[in-house]
Image (cartoon, rainbow, N blue to C red):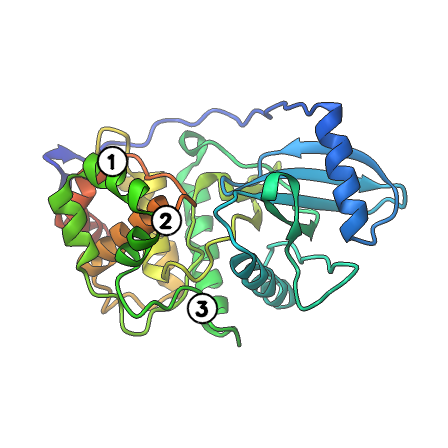
């Protein structure tokens, strides 16, 4: 039986049915967003704005026009630059053309080679075709759901690997070190939280030679499901290419298959890994390197302010081999 930090894998608990989250929006926000959308896009008269959860990197709103067209408006955090979101939009367009459910971006009135446009409070925004579905809290995912997730992630990585589009974030050095140079105060706070020695070790890890680009922010809030629990869309693409396919795999396992106290849920991890590696070659997969690169990527995203550190990050960063050994045990079992 595999362990992490001395704790054994537990059995998955029964999962309750999903419940919709109600949310409201004040008239002033709706009025401001309506004006911005009308300024930048040819969508006609908007008759409804509704805030929805569509990931963690941005605020999302569902729009309905007088002509019956539905859109999803994404207003990103200030840390997402014009370059990042223009590249994100290009990836979304290509993925959508290849049949992957991401939501195709809507072009601006004035293209100028840009797709992301100015939103409220110096934030950038994208308008997409409607993303249907709702995210499911992680404790409500079943083993069958995780098998579907593994298959969808493998399909996504295949599509990203063949896109005629350069991945984002090909730094000449370590991502965490590059991010820390531009955000010294935030880097200092995170270094103190995880330990200065651990932070320096992560900042010294060499980047992978030829990484396959990944989603970069894989998270339960980014996965949309319908009433039959089928995946209808994947959102939160602002960090696409900043991570690797290996980082996405570790993200998924940490988010869905490791509990807050460090206990791994073996049946859930097994269901995910069997599905993912049924479509992806895992014979030469190096879990130790994957976990270390995941630590670098997630640390860099936190330093840049694009994503918070995941739960248990400090423990994993101090001893990445413990998690790597646990995941390797699942993979090889």
Image position, residue 277 (x, y; %): 34, 61
Q: Earlier in the sequence, mark 3 or mark 1?
A: 3
Q: Which residue is mark 2?
A: 301
Asked if 132 appears above or below 24 in the picture, the reply is below
Q: Which residue is mark 1?
A: 312
Q: CA distance from mark 1 to mark 2?
A: 16 Å
Would you say 178 lies left or right of 76 here? Answer: left
Question: Disc 2 vs disc 3: which is toward the camera?
Answer: 2
Q: Identify the residue at image location x=52%, y=41%.
A: 55
Q: Identify the residue at image location x=14%, y=53%.
A: 201
Q: Which residue is mark 3?
A: 167
Q: Secondary structure at mark 1?
A: loop
Q: Nearer the viewer, residue 295 or 192?
A: 192
Would you say 287 lies left or right of 30 here? Answer: left
Q: Earlier in the sequence, mark 2 or mark 3?
A: 3
Instruction: Say whether residue 271 is visible.
Output: no
Q: CA distance from mark 2 to mark 3?
A: 16 Å
Q: Identify the residue at image location x=29%, y=46%.
A: 184
- The image quadrant of residue 210 is bottom left
Q: Earlier in the sequence, mark 1 or mark 2?
A: 2
């Amino acid at each position: 039986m595999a362990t992490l930090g001395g704790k054994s894998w537990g059995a998955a608990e029964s999962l309750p049915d999903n419940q919709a989250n109600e949310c409201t929006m004040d008239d002033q926000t709706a009025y401001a967003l309506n004006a911005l959308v009308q300024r930048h896009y040819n969508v006609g008269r908007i008759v409804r704005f509704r805030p929805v959860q569509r990931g963690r990197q941005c605020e999302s709103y569902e729009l309905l026009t007088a002509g019956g067209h539905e859109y999803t408006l994404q207003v990103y955090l200030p840390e997402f630059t014009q370059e990042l979101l223009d590249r994100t939009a290009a990836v979304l367009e290509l993925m959508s053309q290849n049949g992957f459910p991401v939501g195709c971006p809507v072009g601006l009135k004035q293209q100028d080679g840009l797709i992301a446009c100015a939103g409220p409070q110096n934030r950038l925004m994208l308008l997409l075709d409607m993303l249907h579905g709702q995210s499911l809290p992680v404790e409500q995912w079943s083993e069958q759901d995780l098998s579907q997730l593994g298959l969808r992630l493998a399909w996504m990585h295949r599509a990203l690997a063949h896109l005629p589009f350069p991945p984002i974030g090909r730094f000449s050095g370590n991502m965490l070190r590059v991010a820390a140079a531009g955000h010294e105060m935030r880097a200092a706070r995170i270094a103190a939280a995880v330990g200065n020695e651990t932070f320096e070790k992560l900042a010294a890890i060499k980047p992978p030679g030829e990484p396959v680009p990944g989603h970069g922010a894989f998270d339960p809030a980014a996965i949309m499901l319908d009433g039959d629990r089928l995946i209808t869309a994947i959102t939160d693409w602002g960090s696409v290419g900043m991570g690797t396919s290996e980082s996405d795999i570790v993200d998924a396992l940490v988010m869905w298959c490791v509990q807050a106290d460090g206990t791994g849920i073996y049946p859930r991890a097994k269901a995910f890994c069997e599905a993912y590696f049924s479509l992806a070659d895992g014979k030469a997969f190096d879990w130790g390197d994957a976990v270390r690169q995941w630590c670098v990527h997630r640390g860099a995203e936190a330093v840049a302010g694009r994503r918070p550190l995941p739960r248990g990050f400090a423990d994993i960063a101090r001893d990445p081999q413990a998690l790597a050994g646990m995941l390797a045990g699942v993979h090889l079992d």
